[in-house]
Image (spheres, grey):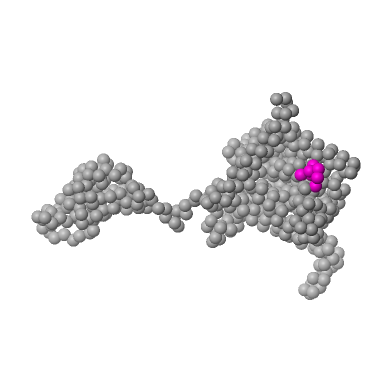
Amino acid sequence: MNELANFLPTVLSRSGLTVPSALIPVLAMFLCASIMAAFMGLSAAVLVWAERKLAGHFQCRLGPVYVGGKFGWLQSIADGIKLLLKEDIIPDQADRPLFRLAPYPVVIGVLLAFIAVPFSEKLMVTDFNIGVFFILAVLTVEVFGVILAGWASNNKWALLGAMRAAVQMVSYEIPMGLAILPVVVMAQSLSLKTIVAAQSGGALHWFVFQPPFFMAVSFLIFFIAGLASLKRAPFDLPEAESELTAGFHTEYSGMRFSFFFMAEYAGMLLVSAVASALYLGGWHGILPGQESVWWFLAKTGFLIFVMIWIRWTLPRLRIDQIVYVGWKVLTPFVLACVVGQSLWATLR
Amino acid sequence: MTAVTTYFSDVFKGLWTAMVGMSITLRYLFSKPVTEMYPDVKPKTPTRYRGIHVFEEEKCIGCYVCAKACPVDCIEIGVVRKGKEIKITKFDIDYQKCMFCDLCCEPCPAHCIHMGPEFEKASFTRRGTILQFATPKTLTEEEKKIEKIAKK
């Protein structure tokens, strides 16, 4: 963002616009925010289409085929227009202000987290010195929106979904937070840029492939906990279509519903991006010396594919099973990884 | 088994079975979809499919056997007989009643009525579901007098 702020005056003077110098950082901020928001919305649209298409083929179907000529590639745009035109219904018995407020924390949580994602060495909004921690902290805001939505809807299914979200959050958040620690121990930094830079030099330098493979296990745990944080199958209990109609967003329609929807898909992108930055070498290619934003996007895309793959394979877990997995499986394993990696780092 | 080994084998089994399931779905991902693009591409019906009837008017001898055999009385036949000459003036099948049981085709002595492969004959009116198989003919006054219409 700072580079953009340095770069902006020359662009502006060339195009013949005069902007007071005090406004330039504000303008840069505004530009970055709009680019990130547009990126998030567009990627959500693409991901929705990709998910439907892949889901179809996983079940020997075709998925969308008609909209936009071949492959139904305009399907999510059509859905978006439909959602925009739909009536925004607020139930009579709902808590109106809270009901209206609830979608925003969900979207803002994901959108804020995007500013610390390192797409490539230069292409990132800003490099926090606590980048990973920031992303995890901000992503947690999403849960408040979910609980708020469930409570304000005044609907028993929505409330059940929200309570499940709360229970689930307590069990996945700890392993997710702990899973980044081996990486931090290895890279000696919380800044995502430094972490990715520490993995340069080919696939064998990526943190997943580092012996003694504590980070490979923590990658797996981070990924599983990430799935749970996104409320995706097999951890989609807060939504649980077959039991709770649509869980916390049962009462939402139109644009407010699409906020929840968008946040889920943008969250997929975010968790995959963070996982590929932390463990899979970010913008570094398979061979030493390869560096490109496309590597980063390819790894992220692959992880998203795995997420979709898992969703269309595994059935939903029960709530007690999720709590069991979170507390009794993921947490001990990730603690062992943290201790093991720290010992390895000190003894080496 | 002790509790510890049960725990570790459970964790392993959980991961392993998930991977087995994922390998199955991956195989399905690359297999050919079973979707039939129905309105665009018409499916091929099997050879003995019992669809809309096929009627061979030139073979028909106007014996009403099919109409008599029909359990739901959906066939209506009109015949004009002059010596050896047979004119089929009417051969209507009401597809609101027809249940595609094939019982009309079996007794036909001339083998002129068959079950066909067609199935798209839905209509917005009741009249439209009664299909007329006989080619329309203009009858003389004399012929109109001797025309026999059999409902059964």
Residue A80: name its quadrant.
bottom right
Q: Which percent across, then down, holds residue A163?
A: 69, 35
The magenta-colored residue range is: A210-216
Task: Looking at the picture, tell me which residue is in the foreground, A302 or A169.
Answer: A302
Residue A12 left/right relative to B85: right
- Residue A56, position as x, y percentages in the image: 56, 49
Residue found at x 23% / y 58%: B135
On whether residue A217 falls in the magenta region, the answer is no
Most foreground residue, A104 or A234: A234
Residue A341 visible, this orientation: yes
Furthest-top residue in this view: B2
> Which residue is at 67% across, 56% downward?
A43
Residue B89 spot, x, y in % from top left: 19, 55
Position of B68 relative to B143 (above/below): above
Quadrant in the picture for residue B132: bottom left
Residue at 77% across, 60% down: A290
